[in-house]
Image (tube, grey):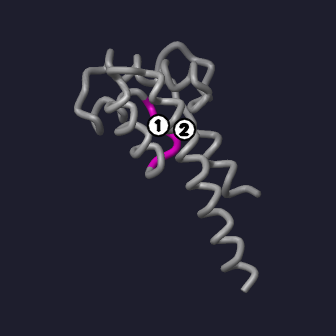
Amino acid sequence: METANQGVATFRKILDLRSSVELEILQLGKKAARAKDLLNFLYRKPVVSPNEVAQTLSVTHQTANLLIKDFVKLGILQERTGFQRNRIFQFDGYLRLFLD
């Protein structure tokens, strides 16, 4: 029963996070539709590279990098490698829900 209750609580937190993040990406104006596609991808794979984003969203690497940069500015993604190239980004807000 405890595990079931924890699962329900986590699911509610995911829904709350999704709502707040979707409000954030509305600030991106014309880019909001692609940003929503990226957000949906992040729920399936919360640790990504720009190459994965470009391939999954069928966009150029430049577009993928710009979307990622917007997500970093909004605090949705965090860069984890410290490198200029071959960077990895993480959706910390989502991953933290599973650590509590």
* Mark 1 neighbour density, 10 Å: few (under 14) some (14–19) many (20 or more): some
Seen in the picture, residue 65 relative to 58 is either above or below; the reply is above
The spot of residue 22 in percent (x, y) is: 49, 38
Q: Nearer the viewer, mark 2 or mark 1?
A: 2
Whether residue 54 sits left or right of residue 43 in the image: it is: left
Whether residue 44 sits left or right of residue 7 in the image: it is: left
Seen in the picture, residue 23 relative to 16 is either above or below; the reply is above
Whether residue 41 sits left or right of residue 78 in the image: it is: left
* Mark 2 neighbour density, 10 Å: few (under 14) some (14–19) many (20 or more): some
Tell me the kind of residue under disc 2. Answer: Val
- Secondary structure of the residue carrying tag 1 is strand
Quadrant location of the N terminus in the rendered image: bottom right
How many numbered circles are shown?
Answer: 2
Give the residue drawn at x 35%, y 39%: 37
Quadrant location of the C terminus in the rendered image: bottom right
Give the residue drawn at x 64%, y 56%: 13
Magenta residues span 45-49
The mark found on residue 48 in the picture is 1
Extreme residue in the bottom direction: 1
Seen in the picture, residue 56 relative to 50 is either above or below; the reply is below
